[in-house]
Image: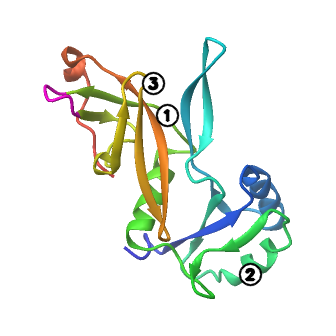
Amino acid sequence: MNNVSGTNYFALQVRTKGEEKFIRQARSVRPGASIYFPKRVLDIRKMGKVKPTQFAIFPGYVFLELDAEENVNRYQFAFRKIDSFYRFLGSGHTITPLKERDLEIVLHFIKIGPVAEKSKVYFDENSRIVVLHGPLSGLEGKIVNVDRRKRRAKIVLDLYDDKFSIDLAFDVIEKTAVQNYAPCKNN
């Protein structure tokens, strides 16, 4: 799965918490650039109040989509002028597109949309989590911990040999309400 319908995706490392600023500046340097910064929603309890809050899925990384024929080097030189840009990720000194499992993980979150909302789940008779709908669908094998009280599932993702441990939120659906949901489609 090297490229998807003539498209390549590249990972760019940028200043953590400066991703959105980088995207604004990158789009002014290269108008029309398709740059993605996947986020997730978690409920954060602060002073007794719960507030939905957005967090990066891959802090410090954004993803650039290019047609297969487009030369990534013209973006590299333009993006180097942006102060929060660090580098394109690749193999050694060569910029290479995302491949195989790295590409699958990134596309999973890009297809969800800019913000991964809460998944809908239930727990089976063996207390195992069953994902009905949402960003956790297709990632069940990557779940390493479930906190039922906080309604979060910790997953481990790999990207360019780095491991990311992130929490994704879920809402629990009563088993009696399960038939109202269509079976989820794995990405």
Q: Which of marks 3 and 2 is in front?
A: 3
Q: Is the magenta stretch mostly helix, strand or loop?
A: loop
Measured from the top left, where is residue 140 in percent x and y? 29, 45
Kindly report the distance in space between the C-alpha atoms of the residues bearing marks 2 and 1. Answer: 35 Å
**Lower sequence index among marks 2 and 1:** 2
Q: Name the residue under label 3.
A: 150
Residue placed at 33% from the left, 34% from the top? 133
Give the position of the N terminus as an image quadrant. Answer: bottom left
* 11 over 178 or under it: above or below: below
Q: Amino acid type of disc 3?
A: Lys
Q: Dot 2 surroundings within 10 Å: few (below 14), some, or many (20 or more)?
A: few
Residue 68 within the magenta-colored segment of the rendering: no
Q: Name the residue under label 1.
A: 117
Residue placed at 20% from the left, 28% from the top? 127
Q: Mark 2 points at which residue?
A: 74
For residue 30, which numbered disc appears in the image? none
* 66 over 107 or under it: above or below: below
Measured from the top left, where is residue 20 in percent x and y? 74, 50
**187 sits to left or right of 3:** left
Q: Amino acid type of disc 2?
A: Arg
Measured from the top left, where is residue 184 in percent x and y? 27, 39
**Lower sequence index among marks 1 and 3:** 1
Kindly report the distance in space between the C-alpha atoms of the residues bearing marks 1 and 3. Answer: 15 Å
Label 3 element class: loop
Q: Amino acid type of disc 1?
A: Glu
Q: Nearer the viewer, residue 160 or 9?
A: 160
Q: Give the range drawn in magenta.
A: 124-128
Residue 125 within the magenta-colored segment of the rendering: yes
